[in-house]
């Protein structure tokens, strides 16, 4: 493994753009070296940094990484309760501010982390309690190499990034590959700033987000592709990219290549990628394995992954690690189909698959059909226990602003054109917003909260 990570250049070319501030690779390198010189005398344990979208965080992150000090990244918006839970999970740890001055320190002196731990990131918690994922330099640098190749970073003039840097997609999937490729990165705070760049015709190169980001962006953009001609790469990950959304992105960004991706924090995180110039893009296919990763299916159809990107393990949870990783194969928890050419199509979480009339159904197919209904912006489906049928399907529809909601009879009639009868939901509810994590992942278990009589569509 290389002694110094990230830079293929150390010249006056721009590395970061934050508002009106431009930071060159040379200036960033100098700042990283200065911060590394301040690290002597740090207490033992895992260092904690808050992932502010700032020059100081990026320089501090790189300094700790290059110095070999294990680092846990915390989201700035976490509540005190969320912070406390994660601190306890780290064992011996201490927190640093952006100047790398030590502040809070744990009482426990017990070291729990793996000796090769370079970075600890926390899972989103969309399927249960968040876990502390330990990643090594080998994991991270293998992921960077895979992302550089699969996303064609060399063909992008720059990237614009508004994803949170506490999130593996933003930090490991986009920022570090750009730094490694010598690609300038503009850091934005939100979609509104991105829209402003589009309107001014100043958005150039690569953009990245989760599907819910693109739904919101397309709504902000309106009809035509004006201002999008400079965009060369549109990268989606974090959740399934539906076929209707793939088609809309192709229309909105005609000069760009669209990439749909799948990953997990436990896999550093990128696993699968599919480009819009592949014939399977306009289907439900998810992608091909990136880098040197190998995939296989269990007898039950669960996707398993092996390779250099498989995590070291969950910090402080050896039993959970053994359940997740066996003989080098990481069980993703996702049910999939694997084509003879290696193309993977995800069908849903193993605990999300719906059993109706004895048949296991993927919610993805049903949700894709629901999103095609007139006026529907987003949709989710949930299975409810039924003594007669085993499970009945309930649909939750998030409508576009000012859209009227058809009657249930009309919705079911429209769906007959795209779904078999047993796949058509029995009940429909209107929701203002589907429950999602901050990273855009659907929190399916929370759909039950929307079962309010006044929101039912009759």
Image (cartoon, grey):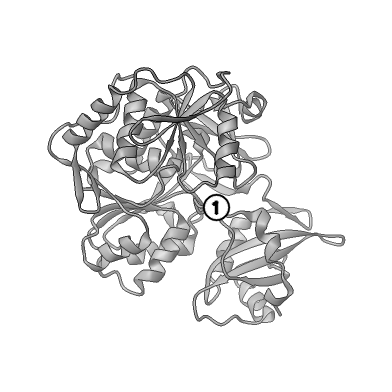
Query: Where 334 sits versus 384, above or below?
Result: above
Q: Is residue 156 left or right of residue 446?
A: left
- Circle 1 sits in a helix, a strand or a loop, which is it? loop
Classify residue 168 by image quadrant.
top left
Question: Which of 149/216 is in front?
Answer: 216
x, y percent for residue 448:
71, 61
Please give the name of the residue rendered at 34% of the width and 18% of the height, measured from the top-left corner: 40
Q: Is residue 340 left or right of residue 157?
A: right
Q: Identify residue for label 1.
A: 437
Q: Toward which corner of the image does residue 383 lie, by quadrant? A: bottom right
Quadrant housing residue 152: top left
In this rendered view, identify the residue nearer to me: 139 or 432: 432
| Percent x, y of residue 245 | 45, 62
In the image, residue 290 lies at what x, y percent? Answer: 41, 36
| Residue extending farthest right | 387
Please report the residue visible at 43 percent of the width from the left and 43 percent of the height from the top. Answer: 169
Q: Nearer the viewer, residue 195 or 26?
A: 26
């Amino acid at each position: 493994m290389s002694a110094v990570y990230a830079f293929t250049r150390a010249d006056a070319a721009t590395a970061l753009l934050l508002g009106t501030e431009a930071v060159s690779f040379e200036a960033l390198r100098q700042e990283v070296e200065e911060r590394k010189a301040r690290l002597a005398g740090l207490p033992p344990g895992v260092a904690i940094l808050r992932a502010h979208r700032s020059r100081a965080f990026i320089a501090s992150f790189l300094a700790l990484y290059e110095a070999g000090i294990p680092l846990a990244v915390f989201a700035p918006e976490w509540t005190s309760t969320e912070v406390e839970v994660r601190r306890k999970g780290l064992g011996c740890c201490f927190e640093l501010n952006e100047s790398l001055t030590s502040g809070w320190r744990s009482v426990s002196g017990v070291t729990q982390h793996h000796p090769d731990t370079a970075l600890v990131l926390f899972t989103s918690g969309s399927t249960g309690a968040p876990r502390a994922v330990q990643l090594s330099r080998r994991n991270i640098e293998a992921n960077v190499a895979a992302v550089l190749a699969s996303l064609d970073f060399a063909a992008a003039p720059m990237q614009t990034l508004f994803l949170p840097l506490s999130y593996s997609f933003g930090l490991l999937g986009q920022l570090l590959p750009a730094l490694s490729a010598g690609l300038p990165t503009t850091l934005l705070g939100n979609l509104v700033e991105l829209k402003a760049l589009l309107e001014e015709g100043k958005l150039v190169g690569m953009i990245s987000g989760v599907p819910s980001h693109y739904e919101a962006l397309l709504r902000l953009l309106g009809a035509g592709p004006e201002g999008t001609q400079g965009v060369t790469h549109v990268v989606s990950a974090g959740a399934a990219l539906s076929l209707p959304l793939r088609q809309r992105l192709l229309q909105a960004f005609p000069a760009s290549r669209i990439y749909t991706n799948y990953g997990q924090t436990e896999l550093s995180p990128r696993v699968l990628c599919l480009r819009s110039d592949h014939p399977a893009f306009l289907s439900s296919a998810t992608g091909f394995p990136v880098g040197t990763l190998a995939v296989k299916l269990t007898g039950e159809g669960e996707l398993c992954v092996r390779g250099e990107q498989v995590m070291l393990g969950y910090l402080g949870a050896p039993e959970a690690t053994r359940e997740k990783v066996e003989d080098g194969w990481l069980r993703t928890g996702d049910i999939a189909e694997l084509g003879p050419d290696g193309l993977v199509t995800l069908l849903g979480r193993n605990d999300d698959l719906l059993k109706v009339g004895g048949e296991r159904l993927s919610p993805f197919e049903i949700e894709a059909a629901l999103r095609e209904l007139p006026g529907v912006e987003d949709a989710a489906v949930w299975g409810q226990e039924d003594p007669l049928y085993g499970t009945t399907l309930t649909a939750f529809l998030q409508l576009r602003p000012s859209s009227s909601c058809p009657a249930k009879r009309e919705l079911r009639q429209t769906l007959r054109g795209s779904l078999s009868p047993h796949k058509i939901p029995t009940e429909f509810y209107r929701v203002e917003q589907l429950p999602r994590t901050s990273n855009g992942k659907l929190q399916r278990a929370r759909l039950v909260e929307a079962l309010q009589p006044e929101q039912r569509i009759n």
